Amino acid sequence: MKIFMLSILLLSIATLINGGITSKYVRQAQPANEMSLETFPSPAGHNAPEQVHLTQGDHNGRGMIISWVTPLNLDGSDVVTYWIASNGSDIKRRKKKASTSSYKFYDYSSGFLHHATIKNLEYDTKYMYEVGTDKSVRQFSFTTPPKVGPDVPYTFGIIGDLGQTYASNETLYHYMSNPKGQTILFPGDLAYQDNHPNHDQRKWDTWGRFMEPCAAYQPIIYAAGNHEIDFVPNIGERHAFRPYIHRYHNAFKTSGSISPLWYSVRRGPAHIIVLSSYSGYGNRKTTKQRLVNIFLDFVYITLISFLGKYTPQYVWLEQELKNVNREETPWLIVMVHSPWYNSVNYHYMEGESMRVMFESWFVNSKVDLVLAGHVHAYERSERVSNIKYNITNGLSTPVKDPNAPIYITIGDGGNIEGIANSFTDPQPSYSAYRESSFGHALLEIKNKTHAQYTWHRNQDNEPVAADSLMMHNRYFFPKEEIASD
């Protein structure tokens, strides 16, 4: 009897040590093949605008960047017309001229990329807008967010590592079927053009057409992933991120940043900080992504910490966290691409150098949520930190910390490389829920204290949440959360 009771006790302890839930759900087989170039033809009409997409155009939500592409740079093709949606006859139409550029990449020449920044929009208002000329005019709409404030409800969609496969298509349209989503937070890896010979830039065009039914109607806040780097010196392409920066403008200057790869916006009740995992830190890429030994880890982290403190991103983030006003924007969200807490064997501990650099800042600032992609699976962490252990072994030694953020890895959009289905065993204590499926998430901010977070796998109906949690704000209501069944 004593042996039996001891066995039960040891089993219970092991369960606590080993962490949370590894989902037993077996996803349905899905094609990982990309949809062909022919799936996304250009729209009909002479010089018709295409690849229309939106992102926030200022720091507080009264601006919008409207972007589109035309084959030719004709008179008027760089102008957007916009007005407040109304049934009345007194409609005041305004026009804004876009900045226009194009680029060459190896044997590819882009169309003309137009970006128009509209400012001083009214909050919480629906606008109509048109781009194109003559018979090729196309009309879309968007709704501005409510004025920045602590108790303003707002819902963010969360999608990462999307690509343009059949699974990607399911993810996007599954998200679009839910009317709650108002803005997408996208922690990197967009088109996966670099999975093709010479980084086939036509895939940027097809991805823009694929996204347009969503991206032309609600803004997307992007972080850059590794598939956006497009650094290919062997074919003469030596400028990292050039196609991405040409195509996806943002309002980085309004947050004091000197680079479009790291910036911030305030939207409704949230202050969103976007960081670059691939600027100034140099991620290691070993076979299994584990540290060779403590000595090498010490040398690496010491060197990175020394060099990192002199990078523009480090200097900007240090000041940016001081600028956050939780009385106005209680929800503090950070996006990176390479996850800091990940228990999948793919890309294991690749985000370690950035974690060592910035984790203590996030804990001290009481960041609510950190979003990452890169790993092609879904995982939610407990509120943990490892700030007392800057030199870690391969297993890491995080502890529960009520001031720490929850880390979400959501690189499960669809991609072309397939699902990540090899978890570390046993499940570590910092991992609350993990699953190898494609899907998307929603963050429904209710007020300054509560936000409903749900993750939806593609195989379920929209109302079903495979993982859910009522999140508590770290600044106003730092109570421990309990996950839903």
Image: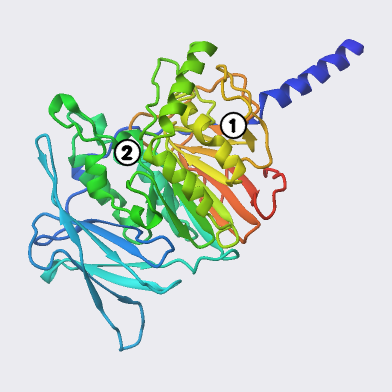
Query: Residue 9: x percent and y percent?
Result: 83, 20
Residue 368 in the image: above or below residue 447 = above
Q: Quadrant of the N terminus?
A: top right
Residue that lies at the very extreme toward the bottom in this rendered image: 89
262 w.r.t. 230: above or below: below
Residue at 15%, 53% (x, y): give it: 101
* Helix, strand or loop under label 2: loop
Residue 467: % across, % down = 59, 42
Tag shown at residue 23: 1
- In the rendered structure, which amino acid carries the disc numbered 2? Thr
Relative to 453, is 10 above or below? above
In front: 16, or 449? 449
Which image quadrant for residue 411? top left
Q: Which residue is mark 2?
A: 165
- Mark 1: secondary structure: loop
First in residue order: circle 2 vs circle 1: 1
Instruction: Measuring from the top left, give residue 454's x and y in whole percent.
Output: 57, 48
Bin the neighbour count of mark 2 within 10 Å (Cα to Cα): few under 14, some 14-19, many 20 and up.
Answer: many
The Cα–Cα distance between marks 2 and 1, rounded to whole angstroms, is 24 Å
Where in the figure is residue 329, as x and y percent of width and height? 55, 59
Residue 300 seen in the current view: yes
Left or right of residue 36, residue 112 in this image: left
Q: Quadrant of the C terminus?
A: top right
Using the image as rendered, state which of residue 292 and residue 197 is in the foreground. Answer: 292
Q: In which image quadrant can residue 88 be found?
A: bottom left
Callout 1: few (<14), some (14-19), or many (20+) C-alpha neighbours within 10 Å? few
